Amino acid sequence: MSEQYNEQELIQFIADKTQAQAVEIKLVLKHEQAYINAQQEDSKGEVDVDIDELVDYVVSRSDVKLDELTVETILETEMDFLIKKGVAGYLD
C-alpha cells in the first residue's frame, strides 16, 4: 500500500536536498502536473513520462527562471520522495 504524504512534506524534502526555494519548487511541480495531465494514460491507467521532455517543457514556461539542471534535480528529487513513499515507480 502507498503511504500518504502532504505537499508541504514533499516541498520540504526537495528543498532540503536541492537548496531550491519553496516558491520555485511549487512552480516546477505545477508545470509538471499540467504536463502529466496532458499525456495519454496506457491501458493500466499509467502515464509514461520522459524526463528530458518534461524538463524541456518546464524550462520553456515563461514564468520559470530556473536552469535545466535545477529543474531536473527538483523533478528527480520529487521522484525519489514518491518512490520512498510508495506512490510512484519507474516502468521497466
Image: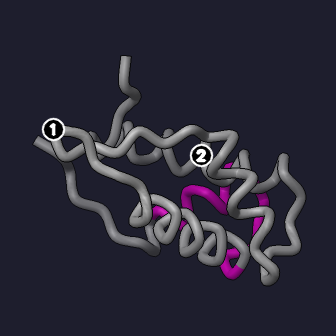
- The answer to whether residue 85 is left or right of residue 43 is right
Q: Where does the image place residue 35, in percent across and percent down from the top left? A: 52, 63
Above or below, comparing residue 13 to residue 69 in the picture: below
Task: Give the structural element (helix, strand or loop) at label 2.
Answer: helix
Depth order, front residue of 16/29: 29
Q: Nearer the viewer, residue 68 or 22?
A: 68
User: Quarter of the image holding residue 27?
Assistant: bottom right
Q: Toward which corner of the image does residue 63 lie, by quadrant?
A: bottom right
Q: Residues within 10 Å of mark 1 (few under 14, many from 20)?
A: few
Q: How many marks?
A: 2
The answer to whether residue 22 is left or right of residue 88 is right
| Mark 1: secondary structure | loop
Figure quadrant of the C terminus: top left
Residue extending furthest toward the top = 92
Report the side of 84 relative to 68 (left or right).
left
Q: Residue at x 40, y 28 (%)?
A: 90
- The residue under the point 88% across, 74% down is 65
Rendered image: mark on residue 77 = 2
**Residue 12 lies within the magenta run:** yes
Quadrant of the frame with the N terminus:
top left
Residue for point 35% across, 45% down:
47
Query: How far separated are the C-alphas under marks 1 and 2?
Result: 25 Å
Q: The disc labelled 1 sits on which kind of residue?
A: Lys
Point out the tag, 1 or 2, that comes first from the N-terminus: 1
* x and y percentages locating residue 24 in the rendered image: 72, 74
Q: Which mark is residue 44?
A: 1
Q: Which residues are magenta?
A: 10-23
User: Horizontal placement of 43 versus 56: left or right?
Assistant: left
Residue 85 versus residue 21 in the image, above or below? above
User: Please, what is the three-letter code of the amino acid marked with disc 2?
Assistant: Thr
Q: Are marks 1 and 2 in contact (CB under 8 Å)?
A: no
- Of all residues, the one furthest to the left in this rendering is 1
